[in-house]
Image: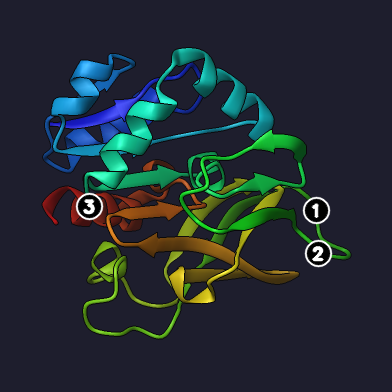
Amino acid sequence: MIAVIDYGVGNLFSVEKALLHSGAEVEVTHDAERIAVAEKLVLPGVGAFGDCMKRLEATGLIPVIRHEIEAGKPLLGICVGLQILFEGSDESPHAAGLGVFSGRVRRIEAPGLKIPHMGWNSLDFAERHEGQPGIGLFRGIRAGSYVYFVHSYHAVPEEPQIITAQAMYGECLTAAVAKDNVQAVQFHPEKSGAVGSAILKNFVNA
């Protein structure tokens, strides 16, 4: 069973529907016991970084999520669910993130372009090394494939080697990261058509 973590934000039921379509058994839940017995976790998120962290803290699930990550359980972050895996964000300077990844989330610098970055954009993949975490998420996905973004901020990791995909929009944006058992994407796979479905299926079947 894949648990989609419900902390009051995120496109929960679109994510659930997309995962079900990929052949997964899925449960949207805020129950720590159900999260503990799940085989994999999905951490969605939309809106402001600080609001997401405030809501997540209110659920009491932060220690649960950290414990499951440390135990090696696969987790996929989506959109702000990627951002809150980092240490903090310029969007909400006083809010601490989960700190799973080192680095901060910065505002997109795209002079002459509209912010938020909203719509379809192509993916470029970081240099692939056999066995590198996150490569399996994009198995069968060609460079240049289009996915759907809605964001004004993007992650800038202290360890650039965790970046598995990027997108150009005024600057080179972090589109996906991975380290050990934790993977995350800035775009919305549940809104990205056949490409997004294939990415979710790779996560389900890994």
Residue 33 x/y as whole percent: 20, 17
- The type of residue carrying mark 1 is Lys
Residue matched to label 1: 114
- In space, the residues marked 2 and 3 are separated at their CA atoms by 31 Å
Judge from the rendering whether residue 65 lies leftward or rightward of residue 53; answer left or right: left
- In space, the residues marked 1 and 2 are separated at their CA atoms by 8 Å
Element under label 2? loop
Judge from the rendering whether residue 143 lies leftward or rightward of residue 51; answer left or right: left
Question: Can I make out residue 164 in this image?
Answer: no
Quadrant of the drawing holding the C terminus:
bottom left
Residue 141 x/y as whole percent: 30, 70
Task: Check the image and name the residue furthest to the right.
Answer: 112
Residue 117 x/y as whole percent: 69, 52
Quadrant of the drawing holding the N terminus:
top left
Which of these two is toward me, 81 or 196?
A: 81
- The type of residue carrying mark 3 is Phe
- The type of residue carrying mark 2 is Ala
Residue matched to label 3: 203
